[in-house]
Amino acid sequence: MNLIELKNVNFSYDSKKVLSNVSLKINKGEFIAIIGPNGSGKSTLINIMVGNLIPTSGEVLYDGVNLQNIKNRSFISYVPQKSYSFNASFPASVEEVVSMGLYAKKGLFKRLSKKDWEEVYEALKIVDMLDYKQSLIGKLSGGQLQRVFIARSLVAKPEILFLDEPTAGIDAKSEKALYAILEKLNKEKGITIVMVTHDVWAITNKVTRIICMSEGKINEKCEAVDLTAGELAEVYGYPVKIAKHHHNGSVNND
Ligand SMILES: Nc1ncnc2c1ncn2[C@@H]1O[C@H](COP(=O)(O)OP(=O)(O)OP(=O)(O)O)[C@@H](O)[C@H]1O
Ligand SMILES: [Mg+2]
């Protein structure tokens, strides 16, 4: 997969128009952050890109092929918004939850092979959760659970990883650790990453591109990593604290 392309995508829930004429190209190897105010259509856009929602009009193409015509989508992986609050009371262990990431590839009722389990453990190692492999997911903290969900999304070895607010509700230290994991996956494994986030401050020096959404549209002016606080406040509708990272390593807040 070299290129994702959205061509004039429109989407409405019932009569409510949520995306209007969204066109976008994403290259292999990019690490993209999608930002924008609540309700601006970020999660809807991600759901369109992973194929959970079908555009009212327009196209979603992967290497020129319409996503609706692609049966095997195991090269795409998706960590939804609030996945951590989703099924935390489900009586499953960490390794079982991660192994569920193989279902798309293997089918639901196939027994997992020794090699499959090795891949489960490798994914847990990447997110530094191998020690917890037999813990029940209900006993994990929010940040640990989020890492488990990332491991589950990695186990099928996707080429592109979509994450919707992966650090919502977790502390600054876990947030930093998560971004470090994502940066590593992008740089070392070449996984293309598209992430929705509100942590503009934390990601400006990690991502290759920031895409700003407002009212169902992409705000072109904002498509740069070097945004001023004023420009960000304009798209967000409230002041956003950003840090300018200088080449000598010092950081100024403005
Ligand atoms: N299932 C749904 N049915 C009807 N309307 C919906 C549905 N999901 C979202 N919407 C509406 O679509 C708009 C965009 O929602 P979306 O979840 O894409 O926003 P978002 O940018 O991800 O917001 P947030 O930052 O709060 O996660 C909102 O006005 C929302 O109320
Ligand atoms: Mg959302």
Image (cartoon, rainbow, N blue to C red):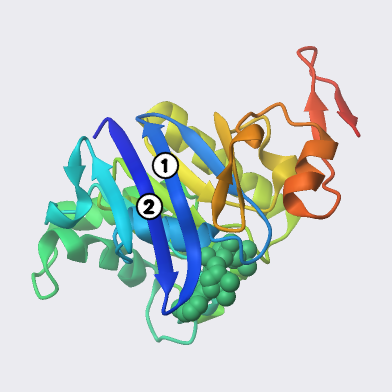
Residue visible at 29% across and 64% down in the picture: 54
Question: Could you tell me which secondary element the residue under label 1 belongs to?
Answer: strand
Q: Quadrant of residue 190?
A: top left
Look at the numbered disc 1 and say if its residue's Cβ is closer than 8 Å to ligand 1: no
**Quadrant in the picture for the N terminus:** top left
Residue 233 visible in rendering: yes
Q: Give the residue type that dot 1 points to.
A: Ser
Query: Considering only vertical position in the picture, is 196 above or below 29?
Result: below
Q: Is residue 170 left or right of residue 45?
A: right
Can you give x and y, in whole percent of width and height, for residue 193 in the image?
44, 41
Q: Circle 2 is placed at which residue position? A: 9
| Mark 1 crowdedness (10 Å alpha carbons): few <14, some 14-19, many ≥20 | some
Can you give x and y, in whole percent of width and height, for residue 79 in the image?
43, 60
Q: Circle 1 is placed at which residue position? A: 23
- Judged from the image, the quadrant occupied by ligand 1 is bottom right
Q: Is residue 211 left or right of residue 233?
A: left
For residue 36, which numbered disc appears in the image? none
Residue visible at 39% across and 34% down in the picture: 25
Query: Considering only vertical position in the picture, is 225 above or below 138?
Result: above
Q: Contact (CB < 8 A) between labels 1 and 2?
A: yes
**Quadrant in the picture for the C terminus:** top right
Q: Is residue 68 left or right of residue 128?
A: left
